[in-house]
Amino acid sequence: MRVSNFGLHEMHHELHHEKVMHVRRKFYITTPIYYVNDVPHIGTAYCTIAADIIARYHRLLGDDVFFLTGTDENAIKVARAAQEHGKETQEFVDELAERFQDVWRAYNISYDDFIRTTQQRHKRAVVKFIEQVMRHSPDAIYPSYYEGWYCVFEETFYSDEEVVDGKCPDCGRQVQWVREPAFYFRLSAFSERLLRFYEEHPEFLAPEFRGREVISFVRSGLKDVAITRVSRWGIPFPIRHSEFEGGMVVYVWFDALINYLSGIGYGSDEPEDVEKFKRYWPADLHLVGKDIYTRFHCTMWPAMLMAAGLEPPKCVFGHGFWNIEGEKMSKSRGNVIEPVSLANEIASRTGCTFDRAVDVIRYFLFREVSFGLDGDFQRASLYARFNGDLANDLGNLVQRVLTMVRRFVGGKVPPLRDEGGELRGLIRELAPAITQAMDRYEFSHALSQMWEIIRSSNRFVERKAPWQLAKEGRTEDLQHALRELMDVLSSLAIMLFPFMPSTALEIARQLGASQLFVNWRWEHITQFDKLPEGLSIGEPQVLFPKERAVQVSASTIAHSEEGKGIGEEGERAMGAQQITIDEFNRLDLRVVRVIRAERIQGAEKLLKLEVDMGTEKRTVVAGIAQEFPPEELVGKTLVLVANLAPAKIRGVVSQGMILAAGEDKPLALITTDREVPPGTRVR
């Protein structure tokens, strides 16, 4: 089943797919399948968008991509949720599975198949897998009785040592003491084999720091796992035992993991399914949250596959979680963010289209935090990114370049006289680093390099001043400058497509290159003959309208991500409004000395500083890490806005703002021209 009802975005995906069936390699990527006991939230969207970014990138590489996502519907807690809603379980899961698909359509998720564990193809695959384990490893599954602690919410069994004060160690809910007949999977027999596999395949565990946790977990000793439950909801366990009566179903985690096989044809005898499974297995990448990484995906799953005589996946990547405004996301706190509602909020607040609002979220999630680490979702940071990175930088570049092309050269692509030039050179210089970052799933770094190109291009416009070249009649120089800028836009459209597909396609449309774009590949980033001379450009339109109501305050400037991104409106507000001497005197500027300086994990531009104010010591977060190494700051005298309202940034309470000179980035730190005691007031 190929999902293709995604409009223009997926027209591009489909065209890519049809053209690359003969390509060098396959790439099979999966998300976890999501519980359908509730609607999707920004956390589930995060993992799914990440998979979409990677899938789109590999299609641009020319790979034969298969992208699988879906829903986990056989859990006991799903049946209980259905009962609470007064619905039959199947009716309940049908409705919620459709909700997930609706959200993924809205977010332009280009999946190839959507697996549901209540589908017959999956049930058939689970039965076949268990039978294959019994044939290949006859002692791997055995009957016994389970007696111990069980968490219904996590669908997980725990030992006495793991339970904390009668509560689940993962979710904190009360556990239940359960005693029932069960079939077990002999996980304990796979410890040495797993450790050997990790050693021989170090790429399997990613990121590296999570891999160390897995190895420690396995070395501590694995215990056999009950793989059945007594229930009416689930897939009937296919093995019978004389002492056990009926009503036994496959434990949800044993069942759920097999979706990665059933989604590509395992369990079917149809020739096309047999060929599909042979083509795509093993999976190249499982993307999962850190909560299901160690115990299930990196330990139980490869052991299950080994028991069945199947090859484990090539890589399992465990990503971090998002807090919301400094707090853990939860329904009880009322801070769960629903993805479509958030996109509607952005569209309403900024005036951009819904598709563009989705791209704003996609960009923010993967620019703000290094993928793999935890993040803190703050609306102030989201809108700072919108106004700064997207409206000021990218949107401004596209609109001003294409407006000048229409105004000065008749709306036609100028001739390509040569492929030199400083911006083309910058793209050639940065392309390997961007590609390497994409290959390593270092999305924030890849985007920061792309924005270096965007900001350099805006500075190029100011320096070259095409309007002045036109006024002076320097036609050749004018055409050369505009052509170079258009070549930059065409390369940016390719680079941005995995992250912001709607925006990338709109840039291509405004370049007049919609039909050309479907044939462009990642390798074309550094090829600058993509736009034929004389091609008519489209109508320039604003990609990201400036936010309708921009409120600028000292805390906004200090605590927008890395102290930037307030946009032109914010700059005008700061620069154009006059203040009285009384208002200025309200600022408490103090000389401070840096005692300690260290980087904040997962934030490439942030430093945590401890400063001496004479009468007290304070902690300050400053967005200066890329320009000023922490070891060079210790002992320096700086100037601090001391009466700025404290703000929590990446879990650190910042008590003030360090003053620096510079617009796009801090060029110099404000200091004193002679030694003065810490705490001295600056007037």
Image: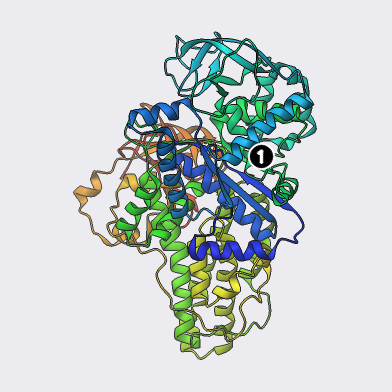
Give coordinates of residue 295: x percent, y percent: 61, 24
Q: Identify the image quadrant of residue 663.
A: bottom left
User: In this rendering, would 372 be left or right of 267?
Assistant: left
Give coordinates of residue 588: x percent, y percent: 29, 40
User: In this rendering, would 279 be left or right of 385?
Assistant: right
Q: Which corner quadrant holds the C terminus? A: top left
Which residue lies at the image location 46% right of the left edge and 54% below the top edge? Answer: 105
By what rule are the colours in the image chosen?
A: rainbow
Which residue lies at the image location 46% right of the left edge and 39% below the top edge? Answer: 43
Residue 12 to residue 483: above or below = above
Q: Is residue 583 visible?
A: yes
Which residue lies at the image location 67% right of the left edge and 16% below the top edge? Answer: 222
Name the element at disc 1: helix
Give coordinates of residue 328: x percent, y percent: 40, 31
Residue 65 to residue 474: above or below = above
Q: Identify the image quadrant of residue 539.
A: bottom left
Residue corresponding to mark 1? 261
Number of numbered markers: 1
Residue type of the residue flagged with mark 1: Leu
Seen from the viewer's position, the closer of residues 556 and 505 is: 505
Seen from the viewer's position, the closer of residues 44 and 322 is: 44
Give coordinates of residue 548: x percent, y percent: 28, 60
User: In this rendering, would 652 be left or right of 63?
Assistant: left
